Amino acid sequence: MSRSERLLHLLQVLRRYRRPVRGQALAAELGVSIRTLYRDIASLQAQGAMIDGEPGVGYVMKPGYLLPPLMFRSEELDALVLGMRWVADRCDRTLSSGALSTLAKIAAVLPAELRRELEESSLLVGAPLKRSADKAPDDPLRAAVREEQKLNITYVDARGIHSQRVVWPFALVYFDQARVLMCWCELRADFRNFRSDRISNVEQLKERYPKRRSTLLREWRSLNQVASRTILPESDSIAP
């Protein structure tokens, strides 16, 4: 790894930490000596990087500092292109447009060689077995999660039974064939998951729910002791 690549990697590592991290930990992650780490920190600070800290205390990068144009490794470009193409193909129109716009913005600031590699990527997204119906221009479920507002929904379960629920949506889980709305259900006074394709009517209420969505997600994880990615998209298992 060249020194310029190492400095960029150090900036990227510092971005992950919100609190000061000790020099020894940074040096170990970068695979360099502590003296080299101190020299690299000093060099970045001299070039204008807003890094606070000192030896023995730790280092943290101030919020809002923008990295210079990124240099991606081949596997990073592959992951980026594949992920954005999946979102563009599978998600609602707003997210799809956002994914394509993100790729265009990144391509615009890449060096010519990397831009050509991004544009000529041969990692493609295959057609899903069943195309999702959730392709509306505006997604009220995602908006309610983002704005932490209650939803009044009409839900049709696997047996065709309708029920009216007021829920606190805090996450959306995307599968190839369906999406799952994770929420707190006021009717059941408990966490529930609802398939979005079985929600026949959605009303976004003006009332914010009393907790932060991050708090609800932590509580859900604590109760289930599993990561959200282990939710199964089976109709019976995810219905309330």
Image: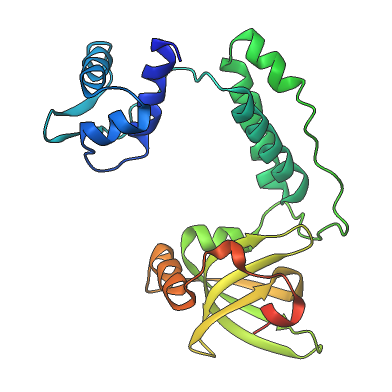
Please tell me which residue is depicted at 13% across the width and 28% down the height of the picture: 55
Q: In which quarter of the image is residue 43?
A: top left
- Residue 155 rendering spot, x and y as whole percentages: 70, 81
Please tell me which residue is depicted at 61% across the width and 17% down the height of the picture: 108
Where 119 falls versus 4 (above or below)?
below
Q: Is residue 208 in sight in this rendering?
A: no
Q: In which quarter of the image is residue 153?
A: bottom right
Give the color scheme: rainbow, by chain, secondary structure or one colour. rainbow
Q: Is residue 156 in sight in this rendering?
A: yes
Q: Looking at the image, which is closer to me, 188 or 135? A: 188
Where 82 falls versus 169 (above or below)?
above
Please tell me which residue is depicted at 60% across the width and 84% down the height of the picture: 165
Q: Looking at the image, which is closer to me, 86 or 59? A: 59
- Residue 214 rendering spot, x and y as whole percentages: 41, 62
- Residue 124 rendering spot, x and y as whole percentages: 80, 36
Q: Quadrant of residue 111?
A: top right
Where 125 falls versus 146 (above or below)?
above
How many marks on residues?
0
For residue 1, side relative to residue 90 (left or right): left
For residue 176, side relative to residue 148 (left or right): right
Where 215 falls versus 79 (above or below)?
below
Quadrant of the rendering where the C terminus is positioned = bottom right
- Residue 224 rendering spot, x and y as whole percentages: 49, 76
Q: Looking at the image, which is closer to me, 218 or 205? A: 218
Q: Looking at the image, which is closer to me, 126 or 73? A: 73
For residue 71, side relative to residue 27 (left or right): right
Please tell me which residue is depicted at 43% across the width and 70% down the height of the picture: 216
